Image (cartoon, rainbow, N blue to C red):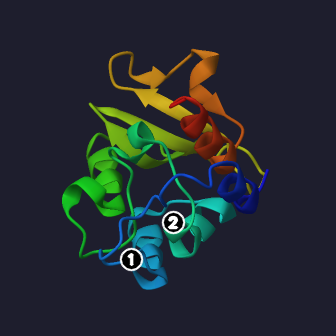
Amino acid sequence: MTFEDIKSKYSEREPAFPPNYPEPNETDLNKLIEKYKCQFPKSFIEFQLKYCKEIPIGNFAFDGFGFANSLLEPYMSLEEVLKDYAELKLPEYLTPFKQDNGDFWCFDNRSSKSEYPIVIFDHNSNAIESNPNYKWRNFIDWIDKTMEDEY
């Protein structure tokens, strides 16, 4: 599946990024990658820099999702997600992009692939969520599933 497939499949839904907000940008994204020494897959970077203005994500998925722009409010800021994760000194092989109620949606960077699977780091168990319903093959799969969950 591609971003174009997602756009076509959910054409009636609004894009993830709200209009009239300062858009994610490459400068801020690169600063975050360097500062937090994180690894994002190509699809996440493309979503941030191009597709967030075209592709929808589910409402629940949007809550706590981080966008790379230093002018955004904390509830939309990727830096806020990365900072909160770093302060907890959680596994370095995970790169978070969303947080909710102390849990973090993360890319599992232990894979040598260019696209990383997504897992949830559960703050209650202090481990990766073991339920297979909370694991996704990659970022595009996660977007698709978040949209399916809303119907």
Residue drawn at point x = 32 percent, y = 36 percent: 100
* 28 or 6, nearer to the observer: 6
Counting other residues with Cα less than 10 Å from the Cα at mark 1, is it few (<14), some (14-19), or many (20 or more)?
many
Residue 27: x and y in percent read 43, 84
Residue placed farthest to the left in the image? 73
Q: Position of residue 93 (x, y in %)?
A: 55, 45
Amino acid type shown at disc 2: Cys
What's the amino acid at mark 1? Glu
Residue 6 falls left or right of residue 66: right
Mark 2–mark 1 Cα distance, whole angstroms, equals: 9 Å
The residue beneath circle 1 is 23
Q: Is residue 70 left or right of residue 126?
A: left
Q: Is any part of residue 57 visible from this angle? A: yes
Q: Residue at x 73, y 45 (%)?
A: 111
The residue at the point 77 percent across, 51 percent down is 112
> Can you tell which quarter of the image residue 55 is in?
bottom right
SS of the residue under disc 2:
helix
Residue 89, picture quadrant? top left
First in residue order: circle 2 vs circle 1:
1
Q: Residue 87's spot in the image, x, y percent?
A: 26, 47
Side (left or right) of 131 relative to 7: left
The residue under label 2 is 52
Q: Do the residues bearing badges 2 and 1 touch, measured as CB atoms within 8 Å? A: yes
Q: Is residue 50 left or right of residue 110?
A: left
Q: Is residue 90 visible?
A: no
Q: Nearer the viewer, residue 55 or 106?
A: 55
